[in-house]
Amino acid sequence: MACNLQHVPERLHKDDKPTINNFEVGEELYFRCTQEELDNPYLKISICELSHNRKGLANNIISEQDDVLINITGEGDPVINKLVCVLVIKDVDAETGTFNKAFTQNKNQVDNHARIKLIHEPETCMYPHCVFRVWLNEVIIGYHNYGLINSLKQIKTHLKTELASMIIQKQISQHMNLSDPQPI
C-alpha cells in the first residue's frame, strides 16, 4: 500500500523499504509529546504503546527530528502541535541489537514475565516509526487487554518507571538500571 498523504515527504514513505531490526549506540529516537508529558511522564504515558520515530543508523539516516510531528492519520492538521523529546540510545542488548528488558513478578505462586522491547515498526506514511512494545506472559499488551497487567502492580510500576525514566533522562540504556527493578 502506498502513502497517499500529500503533506508527507516521499523520503518518509515506507514503500518497499526493509524493516531495520537493530538499533545503534548514539542513534536518536524522537518522541512527540506535550509539556505535561515531559513534566510528569510517569502519570501521562501509556505502557500499551510508546511510539517514536528513529533517526536511523549512521550509514542510513531515515528521519529528522521534526518528522515525528507530521500527522499521518489523514485527519486534522498536517503538523501536530507538540514538542519533540530526543532520546539517545546509550547501549543495546548484544543478542538482539535493540532495547530488550525483562521483568518478573511472582503472584499467587505463579511467575509472571513481562518484556519491553524497542521495535522498528514502519507505517505506510512513516517509515521511521518505531515502538516500545510490552509483552506479559508472551501476550502483547495493548489498549484492548491492558487490564491483564493491572493486577501485577510490581511489573506495571517497573514498566511505567522504565519508560518515564527514559523520557526524564533523555536516554535509553539496556544495562542502566533506571527504574530499580530486577531485570532477568
Image: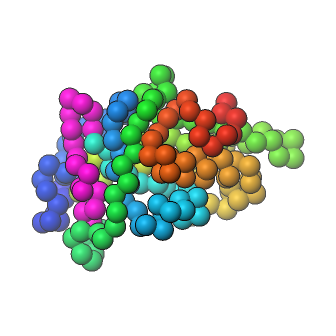
Q: Is 26 covered by the magenta stretch?
A: no
Residue placed furthest toward the right: 108
Work out whether 153 lies above or below 60.
below
Q: Is 71 covered by the magenta stretch?
A: yes
User: 155 and 38: which one is in front?
Assistant: 38
Q: Residue 55 falls in which quadrant of the image?
A: top left
Horizontal side, residue 135 vs residue 124: left or right: right
Work out whether 98 lies above or below 151.
above
Q: Residue 177, how many percent across, how many down?
A: 61, 35
Q: Residue 47, how many percent across, how many down?
A: 56, 55
Magenta region, residue range: 56-72
User: 134 and 39: which one is in front?
Assistant: 39
**Does residue 15 appear in this view?**
yes
Q: How is the image coloured?
A: rainbow
The quadrant in which the N terminus is found is: bottom left
Name the residue at 70% across, 35% down. Answer: 182
Name the residue at 70% across, 59% down. Answer: 150
Horizontal side, residue 147 vs residue 36: left or right: right
Name the residue at 19% across, 51% down. Answer: 12
Q: Residue 72 falls in which quadrant of the image?
A: bottom left
Q: Residue 184, how many percent across, how many down?
A: 67, 30
Name the residue at 26% across, 51% down. Answer: 65
Residue placed furthest toward the bottom: 76
Q: How many marks?
A: 0
**Does residue 145 appear in this view?**
no
Q: Residue 166, how many percent across, how many down?
A: 50, 46
